[in-house]
């Protein structure tokens, strides 16, 4: 049953990621990203990481995606104009992607014992996790919050019309 659920939600996650890239409207892309985040939360549940799954839904699919949607609506972004891309992207990009995929496939094929993953007996409690988060990882935690605040302020600054003058909406 776990394997079937894994395959279904992994496929849903990949489909959402591809749909994210193919959408022309930014709001639809944000909704596709929500599908990816919730699919990842289910995959975390299948791995036995309930706290991580709940944090994935609350923080990423909830708060961050609301922030993304707010920024997209604030910027009033319309449909994306599609171009054929640059010549450099076609001549260098596609062979680079093929080379990276070949490297990943070669590495996966050379690894011995791919199916021998096991869950460790020691289960980390939420108290242990929060102690590590707010002692050893406090600086990255706070830097992330400042980075999100700067992103919000940057989006508001970009959304302003002109040099701070009022825009007549009549």
Image (cartoon, helix red, strand yellow):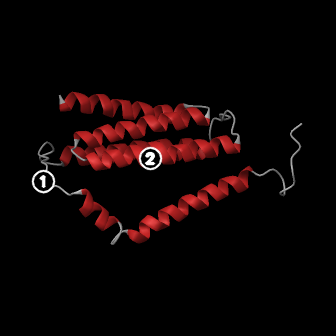
- Residue 159: image x %, image y %? 73, 50
Q: Residue at x 34, y 65 (%)?
A: 133
Badge 1 density bin: few <14, some 14–19, many ≥20, Cα 10 Å: few
Is residue 17 in view? no
Whether residue 85 sits left or right of residue 127 in the image: it is right
Looking at the image, the residue that sits furthest to the front is: 127
The residue carrying pointer 2 sits among few (fewer than 14), some (14 to 19) or many (20 or more) residues within 10 Å by Cα, namely some
Q: Quadrant of residue 17?
A: top left
In x, y percent, where is residue 90? Answer: 55, 41
Image mark for residue 60 = 2
Left or right of residue 104, residue 85 in this image: right
Q: CA distance from mark 2 to mark 1?
A: 27 Å
Image quarter in which the N terminus is found: top left
* Viewer-proximal residue among 88 and 60: 60
Q: Position of residue 74 (x, y in %)?
A: 68, 44
State the residue at coordinates (26%, 45%). 50
State whether residue 158 is above or below residue 137: above
């Amino acid at each position: 049953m776990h394997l079937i659920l894994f395959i279904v939600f992994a496929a849903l996650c990949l489909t959402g990621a591809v749909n994210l890239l193919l959408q022309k409207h930014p709001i639809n892309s944000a909704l596709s990203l929500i599908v990816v985040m919730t699919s990842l939360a289910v995959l975390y549940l299948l791995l036995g990481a309930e706290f991580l799954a709940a944090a994935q839904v609350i923080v990423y699919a909830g708060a961050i995606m609301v922030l993304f949607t707010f920024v997209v609506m604030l910027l009033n972004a319309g449909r994306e104009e599609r171009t054929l891309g640059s010549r450099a992207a076609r001549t260098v990009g596609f062979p680079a992607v093929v080379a990276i995929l070949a490297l990943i496939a070669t590495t996966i094929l050379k690894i011995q014992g791919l199916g021998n993953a096991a869950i460790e007996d020691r289960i980390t409690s939420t108290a242990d996790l929060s102690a590590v988060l707010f002692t050893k990882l406090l600086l990255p935690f706070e830097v992330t919050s400042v980075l999100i605040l700067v992103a919000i302020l940057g989006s508001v600054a970009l959304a302003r019309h002109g040099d701070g003058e009022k825009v007549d909406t009549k």
